[in-house]
């Protein structure tokens, strides 16, 4: 190939894409037991951190558009994980709240992070722990610059 910049292995984002896809694949058995998808899990992580949140704020927190988050929320509402209601002060806003089932899922999901950490070797886990703070700073900078 004349242009090394176009080699798959030279694509900066390819390894991020691959790792992300594989991580989500490893989450799947745990999430299937809870009856949720990975995007729903992300929404739940946001709501477990702060319940009663506007749709726009959930979307911003996940770096997604509201039109991407809305179908996820609709499915979660059908599953009785969340409820959506108009804000009493500003009827243009929709507030998302956890139901009792959504709150119960937090208890059921509490072991997922440690189970996920155990999907890699101790060596990889230790290396990740050692460089996590620095990697997080770098990735946060990249996100900010790409937004």
Image (cartoon, helix red, strand yellow):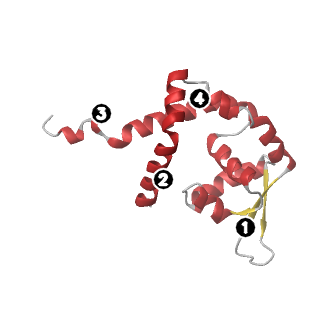
Q: Is residue 80 or residue 50 the one in the foreground?
A: 50
Mark 2–mark 1 CB contact (< 8 Å): no
Residue found at x 66% / y 51%: 72
Image quadrant containing the N terminus: top left
Q: Is residue 56 or residue 126 the one in the foreground?
A: 126
In the picture shown, does residue 52 fall above or below 1? below
Residue found at x 55% / y 60%: 65
Query: How far apart, in angstroms, are the residues tagged by discs 3 and 2?
Result: 24 Å
**Which disc is residue 9 wearing?**
3
Q: Secondary structure at mark 2?
A: helix
- Count residues near mark 1 (Cα–Cα under 10 Å), then give few for <14, some for 14-19, many for 20+: some
Which residue position is annotated with label 2?
140
Which residue position is annotated with label 1?
94
Q: Is residue 109 or residue 129 the one in the foreground?
A: 129
- Count residues near mark 2 (Cα–Cα under 10 Å), then give few for <14, some for 14-19, many for 20+: few
**Which disc is residue 38 wearing?**
none
């Amino acid at each position: 190939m004349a242009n090394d910049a176009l080699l798959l292995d030279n694509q900066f984002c390819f390894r991020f894409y691959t790792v992300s896809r594989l991580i989500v694949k490893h989450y799947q058995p745990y999430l299937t037991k809870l009856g949720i998808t990975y995007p729903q899990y992300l929404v739940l992580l946001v709501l477990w951190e702060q319940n009663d949140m506007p749709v726009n704020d959930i979307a911003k927190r996940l770096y997604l558009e509201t039109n991407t988050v809305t179908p996820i929320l609709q499915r979660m509402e059908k599953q009785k994980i969340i409820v959506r209601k108009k804000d009493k002060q500003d009827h243009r806003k929709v507030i998302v709240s956890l139901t009792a089932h959504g709150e119960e899922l937090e208890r059921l999901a509490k072991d997922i992070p440690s189970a996920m950490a155990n999907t890699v070797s101790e060596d990889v886990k230790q290396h990740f722990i050692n460089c996590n703070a620095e990697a997080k700073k770098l990735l946060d900078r990249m996100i900010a610059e790409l937004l």
